[in-house]
Amino acid sequence: MNMECAKSRRNFLKTTLLGGAGVLAAAKIVRMISGTMAAQAAGLAPMTSGSAMSRVSIAGGDDRAKIAFDSLMPFQHKIAAAIGNKRVVLKPNNVIIDKPLCATHADNLEGILEFLHSIGKTNVVIAESPANGSAMDGFANYKYDRLATKYHVKLVNLDMEGYEVLYVFNEKDMQPHAVRVAKMMMDPANNFVISAAKLKTHDLVGITLSLKNVVVGSGIKDSGAGLGKAGSGGGRSDKPIMHGGGTYGINYNIFALSAKLHPDLAVIDGYEGMEGTGPVNGTPVSQQVCVASMDWLAADRVGAELMGVDFSKIGYLSYCAKAGDRGQSDLGKIEIVGAAIKDYAKTYQLPRQWEQITGWQRPMGA
């Protein structure tokens, strides 16, 4: 197959397997839990420097699977080399198991799987820990089971795959708290993590893109737990622990955990985004675009632009940008490959709690 010429739906189908001021607050938090978070961040592989140039691909069109495939093509050789012999962990955003608009669409995953197949990478799992219910039920509801059959990939419930314990901050008691995190998401020597995220607003942090999908989605829950509460089985979910008790806690925790929990490749589906009361109860935005990058921060930066959201108002991403070692957030240092941002940018309706969401910019207690 001539991969460089995969420009039409017909050509795409031929490739298928079947033939068809907040910094002050953050500094206070850093000092408070330096003994725990600093210890768990030790020995990490370096991430992209904020001074380096990054590339982000934008693809648009009326076929959801094809634009995901096309967005990845500019990076085919680098992605193949980065994966090497590792297993690919494809992490969708299934915040809950029974509302399609909030979840990663099967067609987006199909485009990614087609791309992986085209570069000879077939050791792939689709892995998730939703906030409610079983991941397996969500996979069935969202028709991922057909992908498992077609592409011979394994569907994995992260809640059942073992965990490691990390520590996060809670602003209510100013103490670190233990949180269980899926072990599969913390094994960079053996796993290559792809965040198959969506362009969505979020009622706690403003927007949720590739990083938050991996960080919060990696927190696990017991059988019977749902939406952060004990379910009929009396289980516990650790996802609310990551939320840190408020706007300071959740933004800092996502930033701090990003040192160990982040995607190796970001694919953000904006074919149909969500605005308003995301990440579950918002309304659809037709945009027909997909973003991809091996620099997740650069991808999230471009995602914010496509949503018409002021990046500087998003706490956890602003912290990552200021850290200087998470990736590139300066648009002047991001090379856009493919379509221009302006060709697909829209202005999303923000959550009604916007003033509270952006409260992280004020020092705690102000």
Image: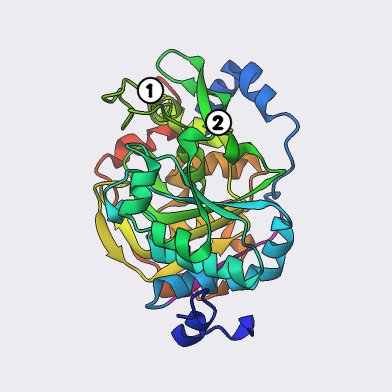
The residue singled out by tag 1 in the image is: 236
Secondary structure category for the residue under label 2: loop
The residue singled out by tag 2 in the image is: 162
Q: Residue at x 71, y 69 (%)?
A: 77
- Image coordinates of residue 55 in percent, x first then y, are 63, 65
Tell me if residue 351 is in the magenta stretch: no
Query: Left or right of 141: which side holds 116?
Result: right
Q: Is residue 329 visible?
A: no
Q: Which segment is the magenta one?
A: 52-60
Q: Residue at x 52, y 43 (%)?
A: 318
Secondary structure category for the residue under label 1: loop
* Residue type, label 1: Arg
Question: Compared to 235, does 346 lie above or below?
Answer: below
Question: Compared to 116, does 158 lie above or below?
Answer: above
Residue toward you, 201 or 45: 45
Q: Residue at x 45, y 83 (%)?
A: 9
* Mark earlier in primary sequence (1, 2): 2
Q: Is residue 63 visible?
A: yes
Residue toward you, 24 or 298: 298
Q: Residue at x 29, y 55 (%)?
A: 100
Instruction: Evaluate if marks 1 and 2 touch, with contact meaning CB atoms under 8 Å apart.
Output: no
* Residue type, label 2: Gly
Magenta-drawn stretch, dominant element (helix, strand or loop)? strand
Question: Compared to 24, does 282 lie above or below?
Answer: below
Looking at the rendered structure, the number of numbered marks drawn on it comes to 2
